[in-house]
């Protein structure tokens, strides 16, 4: 059975229902549309919705549960000696079965072949049942709506009600996303904190997530003290901000106070390009161009620079963040009332004196807000540090040394091959929770600061 | 002292002569302040120049590294498609299965032997074969499969060269380095020079780069698999995020009552816009893959994750587009007896649609360049096949760049840069479309 074909058939039925509904409405009033409560199209839509929606709902539920149900049935039909195995071994058998059914591997034993055949038989049966069920539902729904059509029937209200329900449903996706993020990250983190205490995680000084696979393995104690990661993240972010804040702020000041409109229209989009370049491109640039350059420059000065230094990653990240700082500060500076500038000029201040002593102090809360937003960007940035910063967790305050960050560790912990509920994998979710909470807090504070500031000048 | 004279206003004599306008101290101070002004202005200008210089260096370094990847070296050989070398006989020479399983690597070896009769020893033969790519055998196979009549004839064929030869021809290989440190030995370089002198080496447009999937051999690796994966992912993202985003914006702008529930939705949307993208990857891994059991590495899951990530962008842009439609349009529609839903669908939405599309395209461009969440859901595997379906294992263009960037080989560095150029090209294209849309349909009310 082909899903596309079923959907196409359903679409065809729906179109048919639309036609039937519309023509019946017209026929009931002999073509005198004014005697209908709603325009004839609404009667068509009403019938079509009744035809399509119940069938679609059943189809969705079916698609979600069919494989699980059939697998359960097949497993229930397996010989007892297979079914009585421990759950892990049984899961392997089920996995084998899936692969055989998908045609990826040849069945190893007669039992498995029989099971696979049984699966195929059940699947075929289920498919035909589904087609029959869908057809019946579509027909029944359509017929029900068709019979309700009468000149005084309020079809428009019904259709608009359905549409409003759709709009409301869509608007809750944002809430579900937040709930999904919080729940998934929190749940896995709680599992992790069952293995490792919160105190050790937040205040521990050593990070080496290599847990022992076998009990007799050496050198893999698996300690999960995240302080080196926090320090590394802060260091890279600090370097980034040291680049981005002066450059971004000065560009914003120049663009809003000095530049002619012509220069502004050219330079502003050019700066925005910096924000539009994918971060993986920055990462490549940092690892292949900036890092060797920094190392050679360090060597020329007699300094020893790690090939994956925090400096290189931070520099490039700073460049990426320049447009965030500059465009947000630009808005803030433009929001300072002209009267304050005029007052300053009237006292004889030069332009730069006005900017430094009047505009910037007045705009300070907004600028702080925009810097906080930029910091949250820097902390959550992944690809640049994955490609240009190190993997080893060194607790070091030296910007020339190799450090690792929270995001780097999340990526390394989750891209390898390991079982899902080992502390190693779960640690990634705990780090994700920290990341989520910190960026959330920064954003809330920043938005609050900016809003307060706006209120003051409005 | 300082008795005011009737000719000058009172008080001016309180200021010493040097500090008066035109006095020495005053002039010095004015000069200082003007210098400070000029310095400050120069600082601002320098900040902009420096930022733009970074941009320029970035582009120059990537284009400088990548432009050579658009060409690939080919070597001319006379190939005798002898049936006995291929392991074919009169019985199965027309059998497609036998043709496809024939000994093409042997054919390449035989052709090399025939073209370099002076090299007799096994070590020399091996060194010669190393000049050619493993893909040369596939190339011959494809030729024969397309035209079985080739068997038994001799043809001039341009075979794909190995990545080392390609690097040498493009000048990436340091000939002055000691032989032991070079991937190509003196003898091999001599052969390459000999081939070049005889006109048997040629740089051609690198079609493999644009038509092949990933490969361990740089000269056989292409971005088509990754581009297809990206297109499939983007299709899912667009199909889901645009309708949902527009519907959310319409509800919030046109229908929603002002209450705590809608406030909650708005706060959520604003915060989601600032959540780091990698957290969306964690969500995708935990919910879509582990909880719902969707396949790993699939464009479907990638699209779902990117949908959630792009939604806030599209919602915010769509709301801005809706607010820019003047209230008079709404009042006119309502005045003519339209219902609120008719007002929105017949009048407000069509007017706001260009703005919404612009926002959607910009959101899609961002999603196209996104890498981190895709790493979390396993789209980071080495995948040779070009994905055909939304549930096939696939990777995406930025992830391919990440994977290739890990490889230290010079040949992959140039291909990474080329892939970046393609990715940036897509983004420029999308942004250009957005700008054109805005220019064309922007209305001043």
Image: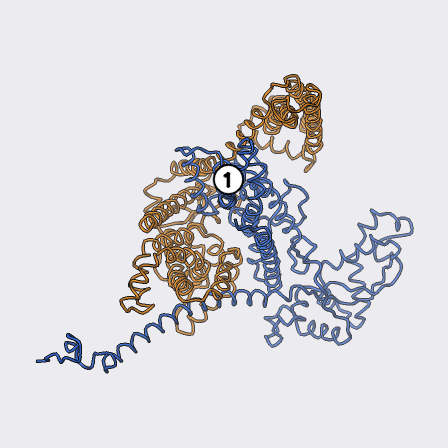
Q: Nearer the viewer, residue B148 or A376?
A: A376
Rendering quarter of residue A28: top right
Q: Check the rendered structure and report the hue given to chain B.
A: blue
Q: Is A399 rendered above or below residue A90?
A: below
Q: Residue at x 78, y 66 (%)?
A: B112
Q: Is residue A425 visible?
A: yes
Q: Residue at x 59, y 75 (%)?
A: B178
Q: Residues within 10 Å of mark 1 (few under 14, many from 20)?
A: many
Left or right, residue A344 beside residue A207 = left
In the displayed orientation, state which residue is furthest to the left: B1
Residue at the spot of label 1: B249
Left or right, residue A194 beside residue B241 = left
Left or right, residue A6 beside residue A339 = right
Q: Residue at x 26, y 67 (%)?
A: A347
Q: Check the rendered structure and report the hue given to chain A.
A: orange
Is label 1 in a helix, a strand or a loop?
helix
Image coordinates for residue B268, horizontal then vertical, percent = 43, 39
Rendering quarter of residue B74: bottom right
Image coordinates for residue B356, horizontal then vertical, percent = 55, 45
């Amino acid at each position: 059975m082909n899903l596309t074909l079923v959907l196409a058939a359903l679409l065809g039925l729906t179109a048919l229902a639309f036609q039937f509904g519309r023509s019946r409405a017209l026929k009931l009033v002999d073509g005198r549309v004014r005697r209908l409560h709603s325009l004839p199209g609404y009667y068509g839509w009403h019938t079509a919705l009744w035809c399509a929606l119940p069938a679609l709902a059943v189809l969705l539920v079916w698609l979600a549960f069919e494989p699980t149900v059939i697998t359960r049935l097949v497993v229930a039909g397996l010989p007892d000696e297979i079914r009585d195995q421990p759950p892990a071994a049984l899961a392997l058998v089920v996995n084998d079965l899936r692969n055989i059914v998908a045609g990826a591997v040849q069945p190893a034993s007669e039992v498995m072949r029989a099971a696979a055949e049984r699966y195929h038989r059940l699947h075929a049966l289920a498919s035909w049942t589904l087609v029959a069920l869908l057809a019946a539902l579509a027909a029944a729904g359509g017929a029900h709506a068709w019979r309700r059509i009468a000149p005084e029937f309020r079809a428009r209200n019904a259709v608009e009600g359905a549409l409003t329900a759709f709009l409301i449903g869509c608007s809750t996706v944002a809430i579900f996303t937040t709930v999904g993020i919080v729940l998934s990250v929190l749940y896995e983190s709680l599992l992790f904190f069952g293995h490792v205490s919160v105190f050790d995680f937040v205040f521990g000084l050593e990070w080496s997530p290599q847990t022992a696979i076998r009990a007799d393995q050496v050198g893999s104690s698996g300690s999960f003290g995240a302080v080196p990661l926090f320090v590394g993240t802060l260091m890279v972010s600090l370097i980034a901000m040291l680049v981005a804040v002066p450059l971004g702020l000065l560009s914003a000041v120049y663009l809003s106070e000095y530049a002619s409109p012509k220069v502004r229209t050219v330079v502003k989009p050019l700066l925005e390009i910096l924000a539009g370049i994918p971060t993986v491109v920055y990462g490549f640039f940092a690892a292949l161009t900036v890092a060797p350059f920094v190392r050679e420059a360090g060597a020329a000065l007699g300094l020893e620079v790690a090939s994956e230094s925090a400096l290189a990653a931070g520099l490039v990240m700073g460049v990426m963040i320049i447009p965030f700082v500059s465009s947000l500060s630009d808005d803030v500076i433009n929001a300072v009332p002209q009267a304050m500038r005029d007052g300053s000029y009237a006292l004889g201040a030069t332009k730069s004196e006005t900017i430094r002593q009047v505009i910037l102090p007045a705009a300070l809360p907004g600028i702080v807000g925009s810097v906080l937003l930029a910091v949250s960007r820097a902390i959550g940035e992944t690809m640049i540090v994955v490609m240009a910063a190190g993997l080893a967790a060194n607790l070091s305050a030296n910007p020339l040394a190799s450090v690792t960050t929270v995001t780097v560790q999340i990526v390394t912990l989750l891209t390898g091959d390991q079982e899902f509920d080992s502390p190693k994998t779960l640690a990634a979710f705990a780090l994700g929770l920290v990341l989520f909470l910190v960026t959330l807090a920064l954003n809330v504070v920043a938005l609050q600061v900016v809003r307060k500031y706006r209120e003051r000048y409005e | 002292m300082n008795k005011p004279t009737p000719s000058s206003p009172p008080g001016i004599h309180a200021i010493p002569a040097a500090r008066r306008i035109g006095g020495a101290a005053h002039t010095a101070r004015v000069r200082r302040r003007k210098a400070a002004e000029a310095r400050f202005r120069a600082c601002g200008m320098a900040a902009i120049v420096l930022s733009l210089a970074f941009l320029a260096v970035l582009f120059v370094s990537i284009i400088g590294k990548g432009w050579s990847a658009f060409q690939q070296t080919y070597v001319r050989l006379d190939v005798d498609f002898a049936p006995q070398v291929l392991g074919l006989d009169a019985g199965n020479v027309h059998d497609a299965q036998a043709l496809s399983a024939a000994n093409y690597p042997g054919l390449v070896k035989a052709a090399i032997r025939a073209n370099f009769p002076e090299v007799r020893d096994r070590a020399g033969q091996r060194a010669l074969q190393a000049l050619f790519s493993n893909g040369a055998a596939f190339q011959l196979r494809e030729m024969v499969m397309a035209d079985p009549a080739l068997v038994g004839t001799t043809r001039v064929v341009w075979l794909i060269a190995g990545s080392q030869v390609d690097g040498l021809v493009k000048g990436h290989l340091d000939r002055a380095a000691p032989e032991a440190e070079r991937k190509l030995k003196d003898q091999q370089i001599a052969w390459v020079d000999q081939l070049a002198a005889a006109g048997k080496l040629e740089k051609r447009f690198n079609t493999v780069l644009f038509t092949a999937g990933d490969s361990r051999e740089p000269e056989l690796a292409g971005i088509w698999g990754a581009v297809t994966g990206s297109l499939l992912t983007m299709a899912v993202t667009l199909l889901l995020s645009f309708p949902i985003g527009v519907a959310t914006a319409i509800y919030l702008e046109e229908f929603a009552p002002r209450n705590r529930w809608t406030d909650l939705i708005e706060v959520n949307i604003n915060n989601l816009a600032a959540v780091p993208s990698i957290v969306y990857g964690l969500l995708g891994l935990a919910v879509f893959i582990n909880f719902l059991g969707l396949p790993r590495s699939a464009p479907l899951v990638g699209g779902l994750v990117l949908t959630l990530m792009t939604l806030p962008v599209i919602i915010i842009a769509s709301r801005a587009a809706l607010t820019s439609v003047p209230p008079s349009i709404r009042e006119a529609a309502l005045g003519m007896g339209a219902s609120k839903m008719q007002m929105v669908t017949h009048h407000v939405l069509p007017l706001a649609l260009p703005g919404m599309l612009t926002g959607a395209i910009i959101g899609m461009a961002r999603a196209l360049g996104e890498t981190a969440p895709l790493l979390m859901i396993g789209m980071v595997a080495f995948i040779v096949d070009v994905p055909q379906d939304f549930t096939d294992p696939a990777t995406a263009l930025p992830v391919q760049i990440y994977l290739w960037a890990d490889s230290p080989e010079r040949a992959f560095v140039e291909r990474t840069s080329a892939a970046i150029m393609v990715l940036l090209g897509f983004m420029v294209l999308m942004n250009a479309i957005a700008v054109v849309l805005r220019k064309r349909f922007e209305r001043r009310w």
